[in-house]
Image: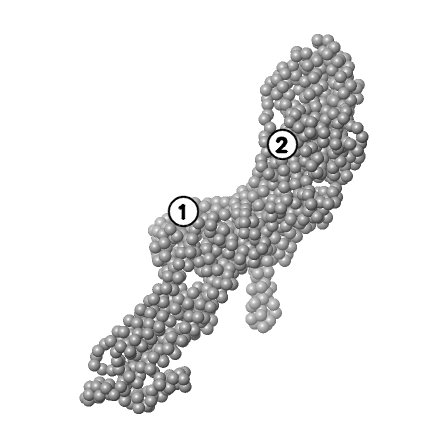
Amino acid sequence: MSVPRFVVVGHVNRGKSSVVSTLAADESVRIASDAPTTLECRTFPMRVNDRVLYELIDTPGFERPRQMLQWLREHETTTGQRRHVVEQFVREHAGDPMFDKECKLLKPVLEGAAVLFVVDGSVPFTEQHEYEMQIIQWTGQPRMALINMIHEENYIDQWRPVLDQYFNLVHEFDAHEASFHDRIRLIRALREIHKPWEAALNEAIDALMTERQQHLHDAVAEIASMLVRMLTLVKTKRLSAEADVEPHKEPLARAYFDELRRMEARCRDAISTIYRREQFQVKQSELSAAQDDLFSQDVWLRFGLSRGKLAAGGAATGAATGGMIDAAVGGASFLLGAVVGGIVGAGVGLLSAMSLPRAQVVGMRMGGKELRIGPMRNVQFPWIVLGRALEHHRIVSGAPHAKRGSVEATGEARSAVEQISDEHRKAINHAFARLRKLPDAVTREEIQFELTDRLKTVLAEQEAMEPGAEHV
Amino acid sequence: MSIGDVVDLEYRLARDQWDSSRQELNERDAAIAAEIDAGSLDDAALVMRWLDAVRAQDGQAIGRTIDTTIETARGLALGGGVLIGASIVTAWLSIESGKPINAIHFWGALVGLQIVFLLLTLTALMLPGAAKRVLLGPMRALAVAITWISSRFLRGHREAIRAVSGMTERYAKLYGRLRLWLFMQIVQFFALALNIGIIATFIALAIVSDPAFGWRSTLLSDEATHRATQIIALPWAWLVPEATLTLEDVEATRYSSLDATFIEQFRSRQAAGVWAAWWPFLLASLIVYGLLPRLVLATVSSWRLSHMLRAMPPMHGAVIELRERLRRPRIDTRGVGTEKTSPSSTANESRMVEPVHAESVLVMAWSGVTADEPTLRQWVASRLGGNVAAVHRVGGIDVAADRAALTAAKQASANTTIALVVEAWEPPVGDYLDFLQELRAVAGPTRLIAILLYSPSPVQASQIALWRSHLGALGDPWLRVLSLNTEAAA
């Protein structure tokens, strides 16, 4: 069976490359709204274990559709012979610079590829586009029209009736806003235009879903790794017994917070690489060391946990400890231990959420002293870091590859961590608590894998709730 | 898998974790998976083949060094054991003191001590964690010492050795038993060789010389000593009764250094061969309590070691991650090659912005400009001034309309400006440019042609710039690109 091939054609500068970039998840496709950028056909094979399941072919677009159609009409004999006339045109104009682009884009079509005809639904339909549609119709190949939306204006109502006449299927696909689910839906739709390709496309869809899971796994593994490293970070400076520690405190604290920031930056870079979005910038304010910045009401709301949930986390831990006392006295305390433990835990949770680590002096066995900062005991800190990471991940993983430039990550009205279910939040909180005790390397690794699994489930559940996911 | 393979695996996993990004690992392992046909291999073979591939890539052979070191240690244990055993027995039996060799001392040193060590080893193996750690403490110290020494001598591999040392500490839970049984095997090899050396030398000396064994004790009676030898000889007495001692033998070989007739007694009894009664018993003791248990322990430790190595690698987190990476379908949707970039031109662009004040205008509306004729007349007049002489529709499929417009352009008076109205959102494709060139050809080289960009919504600056950039490449000084009055259009 032949490999399904789809030639993306259309008017110059109408978003063909954007569609290809998003469908192929390839940032290397040049996109510019103000100039025709594609000069040559370029193939985007969808490969699974080196086996090609389908191919997209980006094309420069028609340069002289009017003159070509005039030529075709002049040479037309019968309707049944139209395809042969197109073949004759390509044969006769091969090497002619005037119709170079027409020949290049029609060659794969005449070799059996289907056509994805891209139009811009944000500009009015004009007669010029109809020339191209007629030429494609003359080839007799399976074809689908894609309505891309480059600008805000909407002329879809003008386009629909015309496109319905020329194409087997018409699909709306905003290459600059399409989610992963939209991408999958489009590939599903492609199955309809040529049934023999259905099996290969089904396989491709399964592979893309698997790849999505792989990316998700890799991304949360990076986030988990970052959290483990951040929460167990300790910086020390050895000093002589007589040394004045005060001048060393501030530089050590600065180095500590700089390291935290570097860890976050590395994680973000890694996630961008996983989703192949190195050129797409997510602008997020720096992780601030300043108490007021990091723990302002605004930052708490956008990235962290609410005070109620933080207190609940502390209360649960305190109650569990108190419960052990109740059990030890055989219940004679009438659960007073659990109640008191819960109240104390909640209070401690809130209080510890307000403080950041400071450099402290620790004695050394061999004389002298050590200045040490870390680990981070603040219970809100990992939630803010996780909230920021999830926000960054949401933007990077959700933005189609045709979307370029940068996006401001300002958080949402309800932070990403606030949306995590109670069950997952408790498990994550427990992992954070274990990390704060600076466990050995093997235990850290175990916690990291637990966190990875947990976050993967959380994100998979959140992704399943996204609009459109249910139809995929 | 050998121990060197395990070390290599952990060393590289640790290095991956610190030195490479996840994407780099994904790409490297995707290539390896393709090379080794990952889908056809079971987990152990998969990891092993991956390891071979990575070793071939980085050329580091720390694992091979470790394997060689272990083989050397085994060889040294075997050779050293034989040599030490032979030396002890030779030294002991060659002393010509004029007295018989005290069999109790000989048995106690060469058999009794071994029984004590054997019992300690077995107890250590059966004890729970904490107690076992205390008893196996020396083994850990030895491992640290070996690491330290190897890092001094194998300078090229110093970092690797330290990494391995760190790894074995980190993964003590996983590899602790492997380390234990490796140490056990080497120790048992040494003990086995020691016994072989002792026994072989003992037999050889018994053949070529005539060692005389007796016993003496202040506290033990002849009967008690005989009972003790009977108990000791229980394992072989039924099979080799010659290797047991009778009460008479025990009585006859007893001597005392305080006995005045000792020398005479010794010489006469030696002549009678009585003093040789002990050596079969001692030989059997060495075989049963020395050689055989060590043979069993050496076999068991070798079997346990190979069994554990067959079960390698352990599926801990990093290995599972590696396996998942190798088993992943390799999916790639990216394009082949790179794109050619289009050259941009700004030649003569500056002339295109100059204002136009026309006396008379011939309007040509490109196909797609939907505004009706009166509207177009109004817009063009308000944008360029002057009188609109005629409006032609061009760019349609009917070439006759184009011909008519071109004829009108040719016949137009010298002071007539030609205005070509086009859709601002469309780039100047070949069809436009060809028509424009035809227009220039018929209108003359100095006729002012104004390209007026039309849009139902305000014309964007980027659209004007695109047209100016493209048409600037034509090098036509009498070409202007302007937006049509967008307010009027709206």
State the image coordinates of residue A74 (x, y, percent, origin top left). Answer: 77, 24
Q: Chain of mark 2?
A: A
- B78 left or right of A172 in image: left
Up the image or down, A472 lies above or below B93; here it is: above
Question: Looking at the image, which residue is at 78% across and 19% down?
Answer: B400
Name the amino acid, label 1.
Answer: His
Residues tagged 2 and 1 counted as in contact (Cβ below 8 A): no
State the image coordinates of residue A1 (x, y, percent, origin top left). Answer: 69, 45
Q: Chain of mark 1?
A: A
Q: Quadrant of residue B253?
A: bottom left
Crowding near pointer 2: few (<14 within 10 Å), some, many (20+)? some
Question: Looking at the image, which residue is at 67% across and 43% down?
Answer: A3
**Observer-nearest residue: B148 or B429?**
B429
Which residue is tagged 2?
A40
State the image coordinates of residue A291 (x, y, percent, origin top left). Answer: 52, 46
Name the amino acid, label 2.
Answer: Glu
Which residue is tagged 1?
A248
Describe the element under mark 1 as helix, strand or loop: helix
User: Rounded to the nearest whole Å, what is the CA distance between mark 2 and mark 1?
Assistant: 61 Å
